[in-house]
Amino acid sequence: MSVAEDESPLVKSNLIAAALDLFDADMDADDWATWICQLASESDQIDAEDVFRLINEDRAVAGFPLVSAPELVEEEVSNRRRYFKDSIKNAIDRLPTKRMIDVMTDVVDTATVSGEDAAPLLIDELIDSYELGVRSFLDREAENVEKLIGSIRNCASGGVRAVAPLIDKLDSVIRNWDRVAQPIQVSMKSRGLEHDQSRRMALDVRSLGIDLFNEHQMLDQAERITHLLKDVFAELPEVANRLEEDSVAISNIHRDRQREQKRADDWVREITFEAQIGLVFKDTLKISPNGVEWKGSRVALDDVTGVGWGATRNSVNGVPTGTDYFIYWCDQHNVTRVQLNRENVYSTFIDKLWKAVGVRLLTDMVSGLREGERYRFGDAVLDDSGFELTKSHLFSADEKIKATWAELQIWSANGSLCIGKTNDKKAVLTLPYQGANNAHVLEAAIRTLFKTGNPKLSSILED
């Protein structure tokens, strides 16, 4: 809109200021903002020297004495600017509170291009007056925000159910507070400043979100608070930057947790298995995250200290009569043994058993070796650098021989794992797969090491 295009800024400003008293209070907020911004723009263009010159030109034509002191005009221009500001204040004071806030928000958004450009002086002064008028409300609501933050912290130990209703209330109070503070925030941004009260509130609430996550693992609630703050405090550049960093961090954590959950779900699927064993009277062989079960007796996965399995081919007079399959596991007190003749069940179960228990047993053993632990297998002792084997002599005492991994070899024979010194056939350890605890675990570790060529068994953890 424009008013009297050919007139000077002073005349235009006077016309708009006078018209403000005539505007309908129900006029759209955008229309109010347009007229107020035009008044502010015209007011900014008033030049005291131009006014001084025009006044004296008119007075000269009329035959009146000239104004001798430009300072008199400058003083009157300042008075008019105060009158323009008072005209705007008086006009918007007639508006309902909600309409007044909408008008002030539209005014500052329009005048500053949402805080990116400097506003006319009249707009800055108008916002400063507005801030004085709403200060008591902002202070009171800021206290309510602090009380809610304290209540949420106190209830956090009760879990999400305890804090969720309070965060709902916090969300509502902050959004209501921000609606009133928005014109001030945008005005401060256009001046290269931040609204101190908004900044303090944003950082206090941000700290709450961080604590909910760090101390109570409430990722969703922390994420909700971050989104809330990004939404209502976008006009605070420093805070906005921190919140963006928080948002990225939370997104990364959320993605990582989803991956971890997927891996956990996949692991559950990979180790879960159940089969009925027996022709008439059936027993259940089962493995799941709850443990390993046979005939109703269950051992928790973490309690399993050893595993083993193997197969025995049977024959009569050289004619094959089938194969028996054996699986066992043990804890610190008992050994559970299973015999079956179904190869598919056997193969599937030991695959599940390896993933559920074997990998953990291997990792624990190798980690212990790295810490200096030694483990006995039969009459041999394992350490990180190799084996201490027993070499038997017919007419003398047995001899202990230390062999590094570079001096050792392994092979399978007659249902056993064999470990021997390369250049000494009598220095051999034999571990039956069906009887020696964790022979398969040991074999997997050694074969993995031999692929690397490293001198320490614990190096497979790194590889």
Image (tube, rainbow, N blue to C red):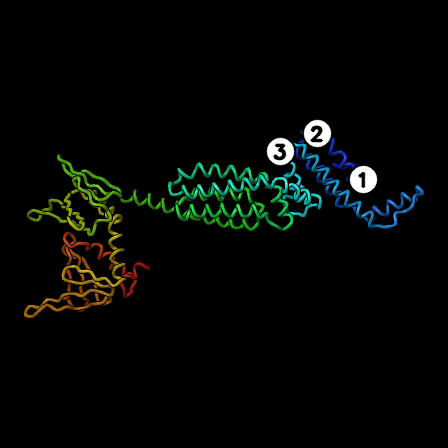
Q: Residue placed at 80% from the left, 42% from the top?
A: 10
Residue 282 showing in the rendered view:
yes
Q: Are marks 1 and 2 in contact (CB under 8 Å)?
A: no
Q: CA distance from mark 3 to mark 1?
A: 31 Å
Q: Earlier in the sequence, mark 1 or mark 2?
A: 1
Instruction: Please give the label number shown on residue 386.
Output: none
Location of mark 3 (residue): 97
How packed is label 1: few (under 14 Cα within 10 Å), some, or many (20 or more)? Answer: some
Amino acid at dot 2: Asp
Residue 450 showing in the rendered view:
no
Q: CA distance from mark 1 to mark 2?
A: 23 Å
User: Which quadrant of the figure contains the N terminus?
Assistant: top right
Amino acid at dot 3: Thr
Q: Is residue 312 left or right of residue 289?
A: left
Res 5 quadrant in image: top right
- Element marked by disc 1: helix
Q: Earlier in the sequence, mark 3 or mark 1?
A: 1
How packed is label 3: few (under 14 Cα within 10 Å), some, or many (20 or more)? Answer: few
Instruction: Please give the label number shown on residue 11.
Output: 1
Instruction: Please give the label number shown on residue 24.
Output: 2
